[in-house]
Amino acid sequence: MSGGHEHHHGHDHDRTFQPDDDAAGLSEHMALVAAVRELLIEQDIYSAEDERRAIERMDARSPATGARMVARAWVDPAYRERLLADGAAAARELGIEIGPTRLIVVADTAETKNVIVCTLCSCYPRWVLGLPPAWYKARAYRARVVVEPRAVLAEFGTTLPEGMAVRVHDSTADMRYMVLPRRPEGTGSWSEEALAGIVSRDCMIGVALPDPAPHPAPGAAESAA
Amino acid sequence: MSAQPIGPHDLGGAQAGPVETGEHAVAHWEKQVDAMMTLLSERGHLKVDELRRGIESLGPDAYERLSYYERWAQSMTAILLEKGIVTAEAITAKVAEIRGRQP
């Protein structure tokens, strides 16, 4: 909704909102949140510091965490087995905090593509991928990916070969999925770190495939700046 | 997809347009809502299932109209009111106080 192509100059409500010095700009819900937050802090249910730390932990989680797990699974078949058997335990093995929920890792094969969704709300493996993208929580993806996954993937620029099966996994609050994509051809000599670099958030949701093309193979000449 | 939806949140198989694949930054107030849920949950005041019950009870109009974290905010407030952790009077007074802080 923040596309830069629809500026209506002269409408001063287009200005950037500054939360701390523009109380009049608070929407009804922003004011509600600010009020409830202050009441909870006043009652010592939590402190502003607790909140700051919670937001820092939230901001520290990113798809790079899940990508580490995927890359490890690509280079270490025994780890791959453990990851598919118990995603949470395999995450902890790498020192990744995973919370109380189950993490089920579903592996793509030559015949099958996996995709995750939460049709009822927004359940997402946030400990390993960070906060979900807006589209994951929005109506179109949740409604359509379970009935026409190929069409939805095409909207992400991902075209699957004819005959490939697509499995869509519907998450719950207690059971969250992550996709283990296939390691791309031609990456045999890559380091684990370089491999992790091509595993994007969308690859682990299942709407995209790892693309080795833009990344030079290890040992390729560094382009001097 | 023959089953009837159990509520406005039950979207699997519903009619919908194209996926808006663009990125949207999460605003600070939205992170505060998320943190509020995490902290209330960790401290035993609010469960994720209660959050969901609140969201699923919003009614179809509100569910469609509200943004994601607006739904959370409305649900969490309703459950906190239900439990007596906050009161409607205190919220009204606090909202007025916050709006009154404008320079």
Image (cartoon, rainbow, N blue to C red):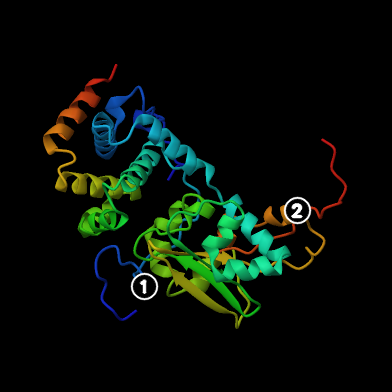
Q: In this rendered view, identify the residue nearer to me: B48 or A8.
A: B48
**Which type of secondary structure does the marked residue at label 1 adopt?**
loop
Three-letter residue code for mark 2:
His
- Image coordinates of residue B63 in percent, x first then y, are 26, 56
- Image coordinates of residue B49 in percent, x first then y, are 29, 58
The residue carrying mark 2 is A215
Q: Residue furthest bottom?
A: A163
Q: In which quarter of the image is the C terminus of chain A?
A: top right
- Image coordinates of residue A215 in percent, x first then y, are 75, 53
For the residues carrying marks 1 and 2, which lies nearer the camera in this image?
2
Distance from Cα at disc 1 to Cα at disc 2: 38 Å
> Does A138 sit left or right of B10 as displayed?
right
Three-letter residue code for mark 1:
Gly
Q: In this rendered view, identify the residue nearer to me: A163 or B91.
A: B91
Q: In this rendered view, identify the residue nearer to me: A91 or A217.
A: A91
At a point 77% along the width and 56% down the height, the residue shown is: A191
Badge number at residue B13: 1
